[in-house]
Amino acid sequence: MAVEAKERPEAETVGSSPARRLSVTQREGLEQHFGPTDVRVDLLRLPVVGPLLDRAVRSRRFQFSAILPNQIVFWLVIVTGLVGAALPTRNFATVITWYVWFCVVFLLMVGVGRGWCVMCPFGGAGEWVQRLSFWQRHPISIGLHRKWPESWSRYGMLPSVGVFVAMTWAEEFLNIAGPGRPLFTGLMVIFIISFAVGTFLVFDRRTFCRYVCPLTALIGTVGSTGMVAGLRTRDREMCLRCPTKDCMRGSEKGYPCPWYEWPGSATSNNMCGLCTECIKNCPYDNVGIFVQSPLNSVIAPVRRRLDIAVAVLIFFGLVIFQQVNALGFYMPLDNRLNQITHFFGYPNPIAYVGVIALVSLLGVGYVWILRAVFARRDAQTAAGGRSGVSTWLAPLAYGLIPLMGVDYLARQLPKFWLDSPKLIAAISDPFGFGWNLFGTAHLGIAGAQILTPEGVVISQVVLVALGTAGAVYATFRIVRRDLAPLTRHPRSLGLVTAAAWLLSGAGVAALYVAMGAAT
Ligand code: SF4
Ligand code: SF4
Ligand code: SF4
C-alpha cells in the first residue's frame, strides 16, 4: 500500500532557502553528511518501472519473497549434503554452492553492493525467528535484545573479518569448497544458519549482519564498488528537521532500520542492507533507491573508516594466499612447514596467517613511507591534529578496494566457467543417487565447459586489469580530495600510489597466468 505523503516538516516549507535557516551545528552536519555524495538517479522515480518497483518495495512481503527461494535452496543444500552421495561434482549441495553461488555472490558484491543481503537466507532465518513473523510487522520480538557493546563497536567490521579469516582457514583445512565431501558443505550451512539464529536471539535487530556475519565485512568493502548507492533520502535537509525519524525508530508500517542506519546521513552503501523498511516507514515519502556511478562509494565518503582500511589489507592478503597456494611450489613448502611446526593437515596456519600478515604489513609500511616522504610538516587534519599514518592509510586503502574486489571475483571464475553447467544434471539428480527427475541428468551440456582453461585465464586477467584501472582512478580522485591538504605534492603522491597498485595488479594477473585456471 502506498504511503501517503504527509505535510512536510515545518521548517522545510517556510522561506526560500532552508539551508540558510539551519543552525551552525546543523549546517556543519549538512556539509559533513550530504554535500559530496549526493546521488541523483532514483530508481523509484523512473518512468514505467519506477511505479512498479515502488509498489513492490512498499509491500511487506518484499524481502520475504526475495529470501524464500534462497531459503529453500539452502535447506536443499543441507539435506542433499547430509544424506546425498559423496560425489562433489554431482551432489546438488556442492555443485550449487561452489560452482554457482559463491561466484554469483561476488558478482553481486562488485556490481551491486549489498544485493545479496536482500535475499540472504542466513540473515533471513535469524530475522524470521527473532520477529516471530515472516513479513508482518509484529509488535513483539523474542530474544535477549542485547546491544552490541560500545567498546566492541569501535572495532567496526573487524570481528567479521576475523570470522571470515577463521572460516576460510577451516574451509581450506577440510577442503569444503574444493569441493570436497558434500557432507561438509551441508554442515557448514547448518553452522552458519545456527550461528546467525543464535546471534539474532542474543543481540537486537541485525547486529549479526552489522558486525559478525563472516561475509559482511567483505560485502561492505567490496560492495562499495557497486552501482546501488543504498537507500538514501530524496531531500536530505528535510531529514534534519524531521520530527519523527520513523525510518530509524520504526512505525506501525515497518520495523526500525534493522542495520541501525539513518538514510539521511548515508555517505556510502557499506551498511545499508536494502531491506526497504525505511521506505515503508518514512511519513514524507522521502526515501528512494538510488543508483550511482561505479566506485562512488569508494571515492566519495567523507568519513573514511580505519576498520575498512584494515579489512581491505587483510582481505587482499587472504586472496593472495589463495592464489599462491594454488601454485605447484606451495604444497611442498607447506609440508615442510608442517614438519617443522608439528602440524598436521593443510594449510599450515602459520603460513596462512603469515602471508595475510605480510601483505597487510607491506601495505601499512608502504603508506608509512609515503607519509614520511610526502607529508607537509605543518599539515593538520580537519580535527586540528597531526596527520598520523592512519590518516593516510584509510583513504589510500579505500583506493585499493577495486583491485581487491575483482581479485576475489576472479578467483571464483574457474569453478564457474568450467563447472557450473554441472548444475543442469544435479537438478535432476540432487542426491547423486542416479535419479533423473527432470530428464536433464544425462544431457551432454551438463558436462560442457563455458570457457576453455585458456579462456578462463584471459577472463581473469581482463577482470584484474579492470580492477587495477579502477584502483588507479579511485586513488587519484581520493588523493586529490582527501590528501591534498596534507601534502605539497598531491600529483606525485597519486602517481606513486597508482604505480604501486599497477604493480600489485600486474602481480595478481601474473599469478592467475601461473595458476593456469586452477580452481
Ligand atoms: S550480512 Fe551476512 S547474514 Fe546478513 S544479510 Fe548479508 S550475507 Fe546475510
Ligand atoms: S527518511 Fe527518516 S528522517 Fe528523513 S524524513 Fe523520512 S522518516 Fe524523517
Ligand atoms: S531500513 Fe533503509 S537504511 Fe536501513 S538497512 Fe533497510 S534499506 Fe537500508
Image (cartoon, helix red, strand yellow):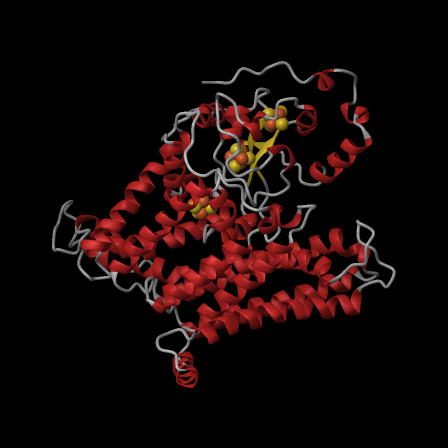
Quarter occupied by residue 238: top right
Q: How many marks?
A: 0
Residue 361 percent coordinates (x, y): 61, 70
Q: Residue furthest right?
A: 378
Left or right: 17, with 366 as reference point: right
Q: Name the foreground residue: 249 vs 90.
A: 249
Q: On screen, 516 above or below 146?
A: below
Q: Residue at x 50, y 71 (%)?
A: 353
Q: Which of 273 and 123 is in front in this view?
A: 123
Q: Is 81 in front, or is 141?
A: 141
Q: Which residue lies furthest to the front in this view?
A: 144
Residue sitting at x 52%, y 73%: 355
Residue ID at (37%, 36%): 129
Residue 459 at least partly seen: no
> Where, quadrant-wise, is the N terminus in this rendering?
top left
> In the picture shown, does residue 460 fall above or below 290?
below
**Which quarter of the frame holds ligand 2?**
top right
Q: Position of residue 34 (x, y in %)?
A: 70, 36
- Between 109 and 517, the residue placed more toward the observer is 109
Q: Position of residue 82 (x, y in %)?
A: 22, 54
Task: Tell me the quadrant of the picture where the C terminus can be found.
Answer: bottom left
Q: Please state the horizontal and vertical placement of residue 45, each as a whole percent of the image.
A: 55, 26
Query: Residue at point 62% right, 22% down?
Result: 244
Residue 54 at least partly seen: yes
Q: Is residue 138 above or below residue 369?
A: above
Q: Name the side, left or right, on which 3 lies relative to 377.
A: left
